Image (cartoon, rainbow, N blue to C red):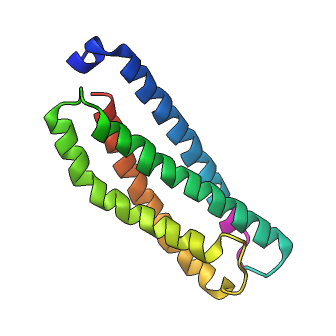
């Protein structure tokens, strides 16, 4: 058991709750991602618009939780070891890059925009790659939170 956990068990419990929430939202995003991807070939019907709008909304909630919840918890935690903070600072730029990719996707499709459906397949593919990278980065940050 680390010294930080021995000193502040409430902090560990908060970190575990935040991690569980992040993992739950991650699972929901991937589920919605798959539902949208199943709609290929994309058409401008209401089903596509609704699923795309819901996915974009959940995507932003998810990346916000990881970006602001997890990162802020690490950076504001005074009882984290210097090595954990240093590692989090190294991870942060890559995580920010994946956040920017998600925000760009949202900006393009948030209202179920169907005017750019010919680009949606490629945009989903690129977003999927960014989300996979993000999962790895988040998992590393979550490990640091529990140190």
Where residue 137 sits: x, y (%)?
Answer: 34, 51
For residue 70, what is the image quadrant? top left
**In the image, is residue 35 part of the stretch drawn in magenta?**
yes
53 with respect to 30 (left or right)? right
Q: Nearer the viewer, residue 53 or 26?
A: 53
Magenta-tinted stretch: 34-41
Residue 108 can be seen, yes or no? yes
**In the image, is residue 108 part of the stretch drawn in magenta?**
no
Where residue 37 sits: x, y (%)?
Answer: 66, 68
From this view, report whether residue 6 is shown above or below residue 117: above
Q: Residue at x 47, y 59 (%)?
A: 131
Q: How many marks?
A: 0
Q: Residue at x 58, y 58 (%)?
A: 59
Where residue 98 sits: x, y (%)?
Answer: 41, 63
Residue 2 can be seen, yes or no? no
Q: Residue at x 29, y 54 (%)?
A: 92
Task: Give the residue furthest to the left.
Answer: 82
For residue 119, what is the image quadrant? bottom right
Task: Give the residue furthest to the right.
Answer: 46
Q: Residue at x 57, y 52 (%)?
A: 61
> Where's the N terminus, which quadrant?
top left
77 with respect to 127 (left or right)? left
Where residue 133 sits: x, y (%)?
Answer: 39, 58
Q: Nearer the viewer, residue 83 or 125?
A: 83
From this view, report whether residue 113 is shown above or below residue 94: below
For residue 30, what is the image quadrant? bottom right
Task: Give the residue furthest to the top.
Answer: 6
Q: Nearer the viewer, residue 67 or 114?
A: 67
> Where's the C terminus, which quadrant?
top left
């Amino acid at each position: 058991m680390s010294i930080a956990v021995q000193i502040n068990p409430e902090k560990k419990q908060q970190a575990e709750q935040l991690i569980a929430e992040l993992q739950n939202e991650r699972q929901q995003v991937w589920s919605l991602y798959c539902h949208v991807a199943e709609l290929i070939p994309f058409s401008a019907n209401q089903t596509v618009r609704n699923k795309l709008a819901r996915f974009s909304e959940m995507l932003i909630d998810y990346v916000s939780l990881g970006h602001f919840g997890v990162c802020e918890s690490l950076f504001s935690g005074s009882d984290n070891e210097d090595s954990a903070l240093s590692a989090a600072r190294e991870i942060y730029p890559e995580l920010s890059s994946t956040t920017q990719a998600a925000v760009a996707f949202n900006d393009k499709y948030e209202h179920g925009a169907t005017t750019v459906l010919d680009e949606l397949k490629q945009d989903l593919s690129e977003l999927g790659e960014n989300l996979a990278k993000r999962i790895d980065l988040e998992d590393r940050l979550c490990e640091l939170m529990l140190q």
